[in-house]
Image: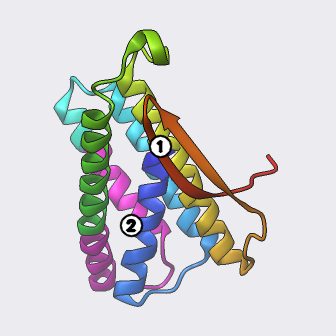
Amino acid sequence: LINFTVNILALYTALGVVHIHTRMSRLVLCSVLGAISAIIDVFISEYWVLRAINCVATLLLFTIFIVKGASVMRRVKLLAVFLAVQMMLFSLIHICFSVLDNALSGLDIEITGVENRRALIFSILTLISIGVIKLIIMLFSDSLSEKSVRVTITIEDVSVEADALVDSG
């Protein structure tokens, strides 16, 4: 889900920078292909040749499926911008992961019940990813959510407040 979110944000940004218009269905299809490629990459992580083939095949599929009728040069520009934006987004996720890892490193297991801090961080990042996807859907559907709530999360003596979207699902 995190990979899907990064793919869709990177593709959307790259399309805007290169001034290529495409349908939302193509954007989602390419993002799903990228997420599937990431899952495959986990299973073939010991074989660098297969990983390289998987990566190249995914990038080629991106450039084929994302736009119809664009020149090769525009597709190459799109791919370059996509890769640059994706690196920036994954760097941002890595920074968020490191900050959360440091912030939660002092959690007392007996008080919080958190045994696997990294699983907790992954869950938090997944929830953020779901929120970003909901915002993207709202952006494309031209509707704003009227239902938002103020949420307070408290762990040990640290509280964080934020506005949250209400999801009926």
Horizontally, residue 41 falls left or right of residue 8, namely left
Which residue is at the front of the view, 131 or 112? 112
Q: Residue at x 26, y 43 (%)?
A: 99
Badge 2 density bin: few <14, some 14–19, many ≥20, Cα 10 Å: many
Q: Is residue 104 visible?
A: yes
15 lies above or below 41 = below
Spot occupied by residue 69 in the image (x, y as percentages of width and height): 47, 85
Magenta includes 72? Answer: yes
Magenta includes 7? Answer: no
Q: Residue furthest right?
A: 168
Q: CA distance from mark 1 to mark 2?
A: 32 Å
Label 1 residue SS: strand
Q: Residue at x 31, y 81 (%)?
A: 72
Q: Residue furthest top?
A: 110
Which residue is at the front of the view, 5 or 40? 5
77 lies above or below 59 = below
Label 2 residue SS: helix
Which residue is at the front of the view, 151 or 82? 151
Horizontally, residue 103 falls left or right of residue 47, namely right
Horizontally, residue 101 falls left or right of residue 31, namely left
Spot occupied by residue 119 in the image (x, y as percentages of width and height): 42, 25
Residue occupied by mark 1: 159
Please state the extent of the stretch shown in magenta in the rendering. 53-82
Which residue is at the front of the view, 99 or 12? 99
Say how many tags the image has.
Answer: 2
Amino acid type, residue under disc 2 in the picture: Ala
Q: Residue at x 32, y 84 (%)?
A: 74
Residue occupied by mark 2: 10
